[in-house]
Amino acid sequence: MTAVSLRDVSKVFNQGRPDEVTALSDIDLNIGDGQFVSLIGPSGCGKSTLLRLIADLIPATAGVVEVAGKSATQARLDQEYGIAFQQAGLFEWRTVQRNVELPLELRGASRAERKARATEMLALVGLADFAGHYPAQLSGGMQQRVAIARALAVHPPLLLMDEPFGALDEMTRERLQSELLAICAKTGTSTVFVTHSISEAVFLSDKVVVMTPRPGRITATIDIDLPSRDDAARQSPAYFEAITSVRQALRGSSPAAATP
Ligand SMILES: Nc1ncnc2c1ncn2[C@@H]1O[C@H](COP(=O)(O)OP(=O)(O)OP(=O)(O)O)[C@@H](O)[C@H]1O
Ligand SMILES: [Mg+2]
């Protein structure tokens, strides 16, 4: 089955007004069940817009967006995906624990199940000791980790992640990358992951989608085939070759578009 399918999708903001922006044009993208796909490209090329279309937070101007074989709207109603976006988007009046429990509440999970799952997810992101804190009492990176725990809490079939590790230090980032891959492999989750880091995209992905700005288009799709996804993979020739391929694809679209 196809987890996500976009056919001939475009997105124009403020259509017909002087400030009209064509954010996306001619987007065709298929993501298979269980696939991990990264979107990479310069700032403003439409990566977040693409995720927001898949999540049905905004409508496409033209084309078809399907998630799990349904319309994007139906998939949203059926809670087919978990989201962790650029801003953590936590509820300030809820404790960390109760933020993570929120999607479980919406699904009608019992109190005991909510508590157990939230505790498990907070331990995973290294925040077990902060369950009773409020978001304002946490650093930016800690807030991001709460948002990741919340997105993972319901074990959704599809994860949509927009630079979720952007505010984290390198060691925490690498640990969470490995944890994320382990969770996805265990649960068969499909993932669409936005990042500015070529090495992160290569390490995580089955497929890296390279985009160009104004209007945002897909200019290359690079299949990544690493021998494994553990720390050894970060030293493998296949890893460095894939990094070079992605960098060249980005250079072709825009010089110095991203950092390694
Ligand atoms: N709500 C909106 N109204 C008008 N224009 C918008 C809106 N959201 C995004 N845009 C425009 O669409 C284009 C793509 O924006 P988007 O946020 O998708 O970029 P991005 O690739 O995620 O960039 P970054 O890497 O900086 O996060 C930009 O030109 C932006 O100005
Ligand atoms: Mg963005």
Image (spheres, rainbow, N blue to C red):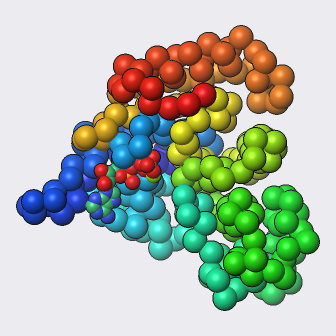
Tell me: 100 left or right of 36.
Answer: right
Q: Is residue 218 above or below residue 68?
A: above
Tell me: 3 left or right of 211.
Answer: right
Please identify the quadrant where the C terminus is shown: top right
Which residue is drawn at the image coordinates 43% and 53% (left, top)? 48
Name the foreground residue: 63 vs 131: 131
- Residue 218, position as x, y percentages in the image: 35, 33
Q: Is residue 212 above or below residue 49?
A: above
Answer yes or no: is residue 186 visible.
no
Query: Splitting the image into four quadrants, where does ligand 1 fall?
Result: bottom left
- Residue 65, position as x, y percentages in the image: 35, 53
- Residue 51, position as x, y percentages in the image: 45, 54
Name the foreground residue: 206 vs 260: 260
Tell me: 152 left or right of 112.
Answer: left
Q: Is residue 184 above or below residue 220?
A: below
Which residue is drawn at the image coordinates 81% and 87% (left, top)? 111
Which residue is drawn at the image coordinates 43% and 36% (left, top)? 41
Q: Residue 19 falls in which quadrant of the image?
A: bottom left
